[in-house]
Amino acid sequence: MKQFRFKIIIVLGAIALSLYLLYPTYKDYQNSKGISEILEQKKKEIKESEPNILTEELNKRIEAIEDSIKVADPSIQETQQKRVKLGLDLQGGMRVVLEVNTGKLLEKLAKDPDQTFHNILRESQQEAALSDESVVDIITRKFQEKGIRLSRYFGTVREDDDKIISDLKSNAEDAVSRAMEIIRNRVDQYGVAEPSIQRQGTRRIIVELPGIAREEEAKQLLQGTALLEFRLVKDPEFTINVMKKVDEVLAGKVVNDTTKADTSLVSADTTTTDTTASDTTQKELTEEEFKKEHPFFATAMINPESNTADAYVREDERNKLQLMLSRLEVEKVIPNNVEFVFSAKPIAFQEGKGIYLLYLVNKNPELTGGVITDANANIDPNTSAPIVSMTMNSEGSTEWARITGANVNKRIAIILDGVVFSAPNVNQKIIGGRSQIEGMDDLEEAKLLEIVLKAGALPAPVDIIEERTVGPSLGEDSVNSGFTSIVIGYFLVALFMILYYKRSGGVAAFSLVFTVLFIFGVLAGFSATLTLPGIAGIILTIGMAVDSNVLIYERIREELATGKTIKASIDSGFSRANSAIIDSNITTLVTGIILYQFGTGPIQGFALTLMIGIVASLFSALVMARLIFDYMVSKGFKITIG
């Protein structure tokens, strides 16, 4: 045994290391099984106690219970991070194709854009959607066709078109690269295991998120531009007056077009009187008559007892109201420096429909999120509600103190990506550069917002142009089918080897088990991702692994035929087969490297397991099998080679 000590230590060390690396995978399987049993029991209990509970509410409670279990035991998350990662096709998840909106970027870069610019930009975007040509190339061509110099909207007067085009293309290219980096940062902070983020073409990004169960959260994470703005909410008197004029236009009544200059001059007393009159009219008119006479107030309802002019809008009427506000005759009576915006979340529910708030705010922000240096999600100790606390830099702190000091007893809306999260009243001047966002449903949503703010704002909006979801049940079926294929493949190969090579074939079949063990151990150790094509690579490895044994056994047969002893034949068979085995496996390994380097997605998964399998099969055939043969010879066991 002493002569085999070194080889035995190497083999046992490799087996022990593989088992150690695979233990978190086994532990995670046990944890998942236990959590599933608990959740099923809780679901059953909730259904028994509340038979009429809605499915959405039930799922929300179950998710909360699952989150609490994972938070209570940090080891669950730790083992999940160390397990063999499963790809999108094996554990389910989302595949999203994003497109960076270059048109919005150009609109942001343009100086003094007029109607001509907007028309050309819209035409360019429509044309770009039907071709591979970039928006920058199309818009520059259209400007040149109309004889308009690019310096009218971009760059400086002294710069020629070529220089401006080069800068615009550089900005568009940089926008995609920055968007990829920001999305990667957000996904990493969100905790997705082994995400795949790749660029496609000039403006598209492919994102694969294995294991994502909350699709809406994922889309918010990817699409949120993180454009944070602090805007003043208009006074109730001003807001009501604007709303009345909108209502009159929609009802077909004549309106004097004075809103651009003097809508703010309407007195509080007049507003109150008119609002009360409207309320009285509502009581006198039938519902249908009121909708006809006051189409705006029938959709955006005002609470006469409130000291604000925030309107209440039903979820199913939001689109209708937005269409009303986008009408040309309505836009004419809304001052240029204000706009209507909705709350981010419904504040209440009525007959299963969410009720949103509608605010009238300044178009230009008092401050933007560029001054935010840090964000933290936590629970407000006073209200027990989730909040996100923000810290500003020195410049932002100074501005925030000035803004709050000048607007005491007024409201400032905190707007993220065009929707209002909260609109608190300024009670006093705020110094130190600290503020907070409210309006989240739970701590998970607050943490999501924290991630988006900390990772930075996207340079341009991104649109989801393709979305594919793989359900966990489909992924589970793929896993079961894949491992069934591995088992069947192994038994067929092992059966052939045993029938053809007798006891030596049994040695090959035994070492093949450890080949598969080493493959999974390496995958776990390097945090690689196992995909369905990867399983195909393992199955191919099982078939190819015995090639080395076949070459060795045929050499041993030839040596035995010359009259050599079994020990001499084994020594000679292994030494003479080595060159052919190494040459054939190296060529396959090089092919795998090329596939991994230049392939994407499924091809990389196949190439990875194939390369790991080649190295593992070489170790099993040249080290493990040789050790077993040498041990059998030393102990005098009879060895048969077919």
Image (cartoon, rainbow, N blue to C red):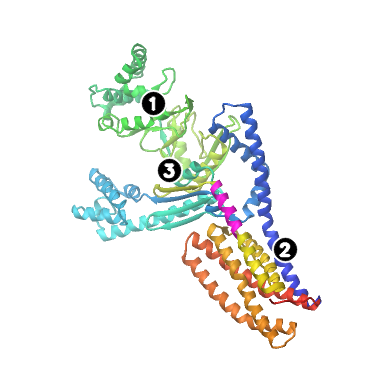
Q: Is residue 494 above or below residue 306?
A: below
Vertical position of residue 466 compared to residue 547: above or below: above
Q: Earlier in the sequence, mark 3 or mark 2?
A: 2
The three-letter code of the residue at mark 2 reads: Ala
Q: Which residue is mark 1?
A: 235
User: How far, Cα to Cα, is label 1 from label 3?
Assistant: 24 Å
Residue assigned mark 3: 227
- Residue underneath mark 2: 16
**Label 2's element?**
helix
Q: Earlier in the sequence, mark 1 or mark 3?
A: 3
Write down the quadrant of residue 159 in the picture: bottom left
The tally of labels here is 3
Q: Amino acid at mark 3?
A: Leu
Q: Quadrant of residue 237?
A: top left
Residue positioned 64% across, 63% down in the render:
491
Magenta segment boundaries in residue numbering: 473-485
Foreground disc of the pair 1, 3: 3
Secondary structure mainly formed by the magenta segment? helix
Q: Are marks 3 and 2 in contact (CB under 8 Å)?
A: no
Instruction: Residue at 43%, 51% (x, y): give it.
Output: 97
Q: Which residue is at 46% across, 66% downward?
A: 598
